[in-house]
Image (tube, grey):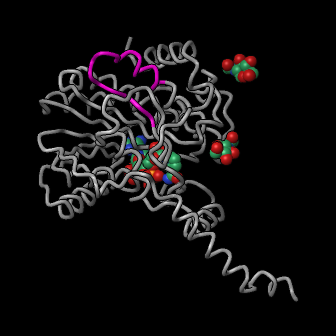
Amino acid sequence: MSWMGFLCHPVWAVSTALLAVVVRLQRRGRWDPQASDVQLKGKTAIVTGANTGIGKFIALDFARRGARVILACRSEARGTGALQEIREKSGNSDVHLRLVDLSSLDSVREFAKRILEEEKALHILVNNAGVSGLPRQITEDGFDVCFATNHLGPFLLTNLLLDLMKRSSPARIVTVSSVNHKKGRVDFAHFHGENLTYYMDHVYNHTKLHNTICTNELARRLQGTGVTANSVHPGIVMTEVMRHYPLVIRCLFKLIGFFFFKSPEEGAVSPIYCAVAEETEGITGKYFDSDCSLALPAPLARDTALAVKDFEICERLTSKL
Ligand SMILES: NC(=O)c1ccc[n+]([C@@H]2O[C@H](COP(=O)([O-])OP(=O)(O)OC[C@H]3O[C@@H](n4cnc5c(N)ncnc54)[C@H](OP(=O)(O)O)[C@@H]3O)[C@@H](O)[C@H]2O)c1
Ligand SMILES: *[C@@H]1O[C@H](CO)[C@@H](O)[C@H](O)[C@H]1NC(C)=O
Ligand SMILES: *[C@@H]1O[C@H](CO)[C@@H](O)[C@H](O)[C@H]1NC(C)=O
């Protein structure tokens, strides 16, 4: 049998299909948002990066539950498209677009200022926006662009909105991290683009580790305020997250993903679970896996002393002083 003939043998097709079915069955979470009747009428939620991928489905879910939803997006055109789609599909017209570029601290400050002026309350903040695979680029603030977008921008945004959330308590902060955080390392020179390898997901992995570390420290600082903070892995999801990778890698991701990865709608389930489910009320400082179960984050994300230090450094880097 030729090499190709061997690869195309029906045995392979059948076993791949079977494996795909098994994977599909087990990747379904233990929680079904459509079966949950939690209502968000009278609640306000912000979802960053809500114009596509996982974020769009998180925002759609909140809109369907009757929340006032703010889509925090960087592109007016892409944001407007999602705004119309979410309003249409949910029948909720209380959905709004506000522009923010999370890689710029000034833009984050502008955005937060407007939110504080316009919103009377904020019950849910989902830090969802993120990038991966960008080449080396230093922002106007002097940070690596991936660190600025995935960690420092959302970190500042969260801190600027904290008082509003405390006044609105009970309130929940959900940060979409990734299982990749387990491969990350902490080196404070990374923030400024030093000591980084710009290849594949190296930088991304570090940023996701900081997401989980700082979310845990934030939760400790928020004890007793009625505001909770957790991080979550959405699963491996077919979104635009690979858009900055080489074509070959993207095709491979699509091909394998077609069988084995989650759809963006499925990827939104664990973040939605953290943000709205009755079972997760009051839970704070935890990391959720993509099937909605509580999981232990990497050892570095459980090191309290390191978390205190990381949080303080990020505070200093994002403050104007
Ligand atoms: N997909 C996965 O397998 C996977 C796995 C683990 C974790 N995650 C995490 O899940 C989250 C959502 O990712 P996704 O997979 O849905 O990716 P995606 O389809 O690429 O969506 C990312 C979103 O973030 C926005 N964004 C990027 N840079 C921004 C900036 N500087 N300012 C404001 N918004 C910005 C994008 O806006 P534009 O469209 O305008 O660029 C887009 O709305 C990310 O935090 C990602 O790290 C994803
Ligand atoms: C880069 O990493 C090395 C070894 O991990 C460390 O000694 C050095 O201080 C780092 N560079 C900067 C600029 O911090
Ligand atoms: C980033 O994390 C993923 C998932 O844990 C891993 O497969 C990959 O090898 C990591 N990349 C690096 C450069 O460590």
Q: Position of residue 242 (x, y in %)?
A: 55, 55
Above or below, 261 against 130 in this view is below
Q: Quadrant of residue 199?
A: top right
User: On the rendered image, what quadrant is the C terminus found in?
Assistant: top left
Looking at the image, which residue is at 43% across and 36% down?
A: 103
Comparing 189 with 202, the one in front is: 202
Q: Is residue 218 magenta?
A: yes
- Looking at the image, the residue that sits furthest to the right is 1
Horizontal relation, residue 197 to residue 191: left or right: right
Looking at the image, which residue is at 57% across and 40% down?
A: 204
Highlighted range, magenta: 214-231
Above or below, 265 against 177 in this view is below
Horizontal relation, residue 317 to residue 2: left or right: left
Comparing 293 with 10, the one in front is: 293
Q: How many marks?
A: 0
Looking at the image, which residue is at 18% across and 64% down?
A: 88
Q: Position of residue 247 (x, y in %)?
A: 62, 64
Horizontal relation, residue 70 to residue 11: left or right: left
Q: Is residue 290 magenta?
A: no
Q: Position of residue 25 (x, y in %)?
A: 51, 64
Comparing 15 with 115, the one in front is: 15
Q: Quadrant of residue 192?
A: top right
